[in-house]
Structures are given as C-alpha cells and as structure tokens.
Image (cartoon, rainbow, N blue to C red):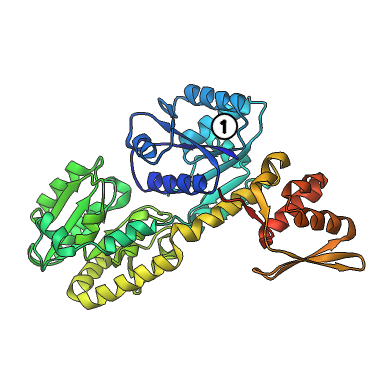
Amino acid sequence: MKVLIAISDQAWGGKQRFMTDVLIGMRDAGYEVHPIVEGGGKLATKLSDHGFVPLLVPSFADHSPVVQIVADQLTADPVHVVCATGRADAAALHVALRDSPHRPMTMFIRHSAFPLDEGGEARAFVDTAHLLVATSHEQAANQFDQERASNRNVVVVPSFVDKDFVDSVADADTMSARAGLEIPEDAFVFAVLARLSWEKGIARAVIAMAEVGNSADEVVMLIAGDGPQRSELAELAEKMGVHDRVRFLGHVEDTKEVLAAADAVVLPSTVPETGPLALKEAMGAGKPVIASRVGGISEFVRHETDGILVSSDDELVSAMNAMWTDTSRAMEMGRNARENIVRGHLSEHRMPYLLHCIERQAVSVVESATLLPEFSWQDVRFRPESSGGLLFVPHTSAVLELPEPLYRVLHASAEKRRSEALSSLPGPAFEKTVGQLLDMGALARRIP
C-alpha cells in the first residue's frame, strides 16, 4: 500500500523521532511510504539520511502547497492511506481530500499533550478519520472521546524506543562521558533532555537545584536542549545561585553521551505528556527518572520502582534529594527501569501492533485487489463438519467456525496459498471474514 504521512514542525524532537521510527517500521514491513514535511528543517534532513525522499512544502499553515502535492500524488498513482500527525497538517490534508474524487483510508497519529480545538479543518479531519492512534490511554480518553464520531476506531499505541539506541547508551563509558563534559567524577548528575519551553517545567528543576546539594562536586544538572526559554532559564540559574551547577548544553544532536554521564533524568512537565521519548530512552539506558505525575507518564513509569513521580515543587525537591543521597537505591531503580522498557516498550513490541491496526482498518476501506496480495496464508488447519467446518491456527490456538459456502472458499484459498481468492467474498462478508483472519493470525502481511 502507498502511504502519505504528513509530519508538521521542522524541529527534531520526540514526536519527530517517534514518527521517523514509525516510517522506518512501515517501510520495513513493505509499505511504500512518502513523508510530507516542511522544507528547510532538521526533520527533512533526518528523513533523507534514513533513505526517504520527503515531499517538501513551504508550510502546513499555508494549505495551498499541501493541497496541490496531495492532489498530484492522488492523481499520479493511487494512494491507499493518508496520515496526519498534527493540527496544521491535519487541516491541510482535510482540505486536500475534501474536493478529491479519491477516498483513501485516513488516519491520525497524535503524539501531543495539547488537544485539538473544537471545530475547524483539523477537527473535521479527526472526526472523519478511519483510524485514530493515541500514544497514551489518558490521551485517548481526553482527546479522542468515543462519543464524537461513531465511524472511527481509536487505538492506543504507546511511543517506543529503538533497542540499538538504549544498548549503545548502556554500553557507553560513564567516566569518559563525564570527562568530555568536564564533570567531576564523583558528582551525582541529573540530566534534563527537553525542548526549553514552558510546558516542560524546566524552571522547576532549576529552582529545585538551590535545595539539592551544595556544590558542583556533589550535584550537577545537565540541560540538553534549546528553545524559547533558553535565556530566561540561564538568568533563573544565576538568580538562584546555581549557575555553577546547572550546565546548559544547547541542542544536542546525539544524547548518548549526556545519558551516559547522567545518574538520573528529570522531566517536571506542567502539561499532560503522552509518552515522552526522553524518559523512555533514559529508562532503557538504565537511568532512574523523576517525572511529573501527569498525562500518560504514570502509564509506564512505576512510582518508587523505575523512579519517582511528583505532583508539586516540594515533592520534586524531595525526590531529587532522595535520589542523590541514596545512590544504591537510584541504581536499583535504574535497573528496574531498563527491564521495564526492554520487556515491553521497544519498537519490536509496539510496531507490529500498529501495523495490525492499520491493516485491520484498511480491510473496510482499501480495495481488495490492492490489499489481498499483501497478505499470505499462515500455518492453518481445516476440519470439515456436517454443516461447514472449523479453521484452526496452531500458533495462536484460535478457532473459527465457518458455514458451508464460506468454509469452501477459505479452504480452497488456503490450500492454493492464494489470498487473492478471498476477493470473491461479497462486501460485508469480505470485511468481517478477512478481519477475523487477520485477528486470529491466519493471514499475515508478506514481509519483503
């Protein structure tokens, strides 16, 4: 299937890294992926580095270029799935599709704490989308309430981490990393890895440092990131008397060295974060975390097991002091955090489910002639009965009871290993049956 995915914002942050991993996962699964991004930013460059050829637009806020690009793509070659990831690109795609004779499957992947406005083109895209993907249960409940539209499917696919990244950090030498950053070997190092903007609550961490430790030999904070609050935060550190212990590193292209040098990671967000990659990557690298008890963070950070969740400035100070004064406990939480991420939050765990959700929804939208050749029969067993028969999938233990006509069609299709033969099923029966076959593992995507 051919997929157009619009990703707004030229910056390179958690959302953009997550979506890049999604694009790579879809491409590896055999999708023809065409990202649409704003030109001139880091995202376009990063996608090119990964072998994609982004379709560049001047700005999603100016709908005209996006409308034309999508129209050209729809006309030149059938597009089967169109995906938005933000409010500006969702609005642009809605305008593009509104006047198009083509009706691809539409989906929206939301990796943001901020809900969409009521009304407008972006909300219209969401309200008519075939598939909505939230990255936390909290987000699904508060941003994608089921009562808004009955024709959509909301699924939760938490953000995931690349195993190679966490392994490379875990294998890095802490002392070398600290030497490179000119940090005392015995100091306890807190790291903040985030965009320097108000919603990340970084000012709270800077203020807390005035009550955590007494010198750079005891406690240091590294702040890796850039943004509109850079000068304001530096002035705050000076005002609080911690400028010698709070280091502003600016934008860090590769955060491995910062994580390797750190003992713990802090993210005192003031908005309901969905699933910050900075926290998951830190946890995967074996670092305990201190984070706000907001949004979807508590869905993957286990309080007092992987780190400490806080609800106030006083709790933040207490958590940081508890962490640096009991390093053995901090290291234990770091080990727990790594096990948590490696066991259930890697791309190899999450990406197959996202692909299944896309394919499951595509059954009711994409033409069977396009869809079926991308699936192949798995190991299945058939047993005839007096009025039809049973289909059994050994590796899932799933069983499907079939009436006589349907049993014959499926048995013949599976015996000849031709999934395309299922196109003979009438519309409603096709959607129901192929969906069931995907759910039970009887059909699976052909991996190139």
Q: Nearer the viewer, residue 159 or 292?
A: 159
Q: Position of residue 292 (x, y in %)?
A: 34, 61
In this rendering, is residue 334 above or below 19?
below
In this rendering, is residue 111 above or below 401?
above
Seen in the image, is 83 located left or right of residue 399? left
Q: Position of residue 138 (x, y in %)?
A: 49, 58
Q: Nearer the viewer, residue 70 or 172?
A: 172
Q: Is residue 141 among what the camera can see?
A: no
Residue visible at 33% across and 38% down in the picture: 11
Q: Position of residue 438 (x, y in %)?
A: 67, 56
Q: Nearer the viewer, residue 290 or 332?
A: 332
Instruction: Please tell me in which quadrant of the rendered image residue 323 appears.
Output: bottom left
**Secondary structure under badge 1?**
helix
Residue visible at 38% across and 59% down in the picture: 163
Q: Which residue is disc 1 drawn over? A: 94
Q: Amino acid at mark 1?
A: His
Seen in the image, is 404 located left or right of residue 147? right
Instruction: Please tell me in which quadrant of the rendered image residue 371 appears.
Output: top right
Q: Position of residue 223 (x, y in %)?
A: 20, 52
Residue visible at 10% across and 53% down in the picture: 243
